[in-house]
Amino acid sequence: MSNLPPNRKVRTGEVVSSKMDKTVVVKIERKILHPVFRKIIKKTKKLYAHDGDNSCKVGDTVQVVETRPLSKSKRWKVVSILESNR
């Protein structure tokens, strides 16, 4: 990951679907403080990421990096599998 430009966004998330060819759906979860109720709540977002060799499975923890648009909805690429669920 050291060869990436320094201004790329990097996120860590969990693979929730790998049924497509060379594409996985990654769930990114973040915790924020509610401005009124002062309670920590979870916000999730699903990203489509490019997985060139179809190595990711459902439940894997992966690291994705922002890249050029690869299709209508794919703007992220899987860099590494941090934790495998096999």
Image (cartoon, helix red, strand yellow):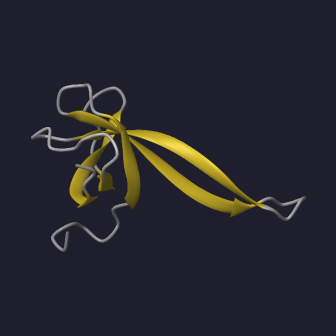
Q: Is residue 22 above or below residue 38?
A: above
- Quarter holding residue 5: bottom left
Q: Residue at x 52, y 43 (%)?
A: 45
x, y percentage for residue 13?
Answer: 40, 53
Q: Left or right of 67: which side holds 31?
A: right
* Residue at 21 percent of width and 44 percent of height: 56
Residue closest to the far right: 36
> Which quadrant of the structure image shows residue 7?
bottom left
- In the image, is 31 to the left or to the right of 54? right
Question: Which corner quadrant holds the N terminus?
Answer: bottom left
Q: Image check: 79 left or right of 76?
A: left
Q: Does 11 appear above or below 19?
A: below
Q: Residue furthest front?
A: 86
| Outermost residue to the left | 53
Q: Image height check: is 24 above or below 32?
A: above
Query: Which residue is more in the foreground, 69 or 2?
Result: 2
Residue 86 x %, y % = 22, 49
Image coordinates of residue 42 in percent, x first then y, are 65, 53
| 81 to the left or right of 43 | left
**At x 63% / y 49%, what residue is drawn?**
43
Q: How many marks?
A: 0
Which of the pair 86/5 is nearer the observer? 86
Q: Residue at x 9, y 41 (%)?
A: 53
